[in-house]
Amino acid sequence: MEDLVKTVETFLAYSDEKLEELSQKNQKLKQEESLKEEKP
């Protein structure tokens, strides 16, 4: 049972990390898009 808890905690920590990573990538893409739109 202890192993299961550890596994879930690890998974959740990993998920948070991934979300943060995706969020940053998304932010970058949005910035690039707005830069493209500003140029004629």
Image (cartoon, rainbow, N blue to C red):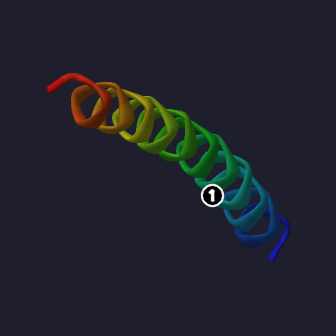
Residue 25 x, y percent position in the rendering = 43, 34
Screen quadrant of the C terminus: top left
Where 8 sits versus 29, above or below? below
- Amino acid type of the residue tagged 1 in the rendering: Phe
Residue 6 x, y percent position in the rendering = 78, 57
Front-most of residues 39 and 20: 39
Front-most of residues 1 and 13: 13
In the image, farthest residue toward the left: 40
Where 12 sits versus 14, above or below? below
Asked where in the image residue 24 lies, by quadrant, the reply is top right
Q: Does residue 15 appear left or right of residue 33 in this picture?
A: right
Asked where in the image residue 32 lies, by quadrant, the reply is top left
Front-most of residues 14 and 33: 33
| Residue hosting label 1 | 11
Count of marks overlaid on the render: 1
Which residue is drawn at the image coordinates 71% and 67% (left, top)?
A: 8
Residue 7 x, y percent position in the rendering = 67, 60
Q: Residues within 10 Å of mark 1 (few under 14, many from 20)?
A: few
Which residue is drawn at the image coordinates 51% and 38% (left, top)?
A: 27
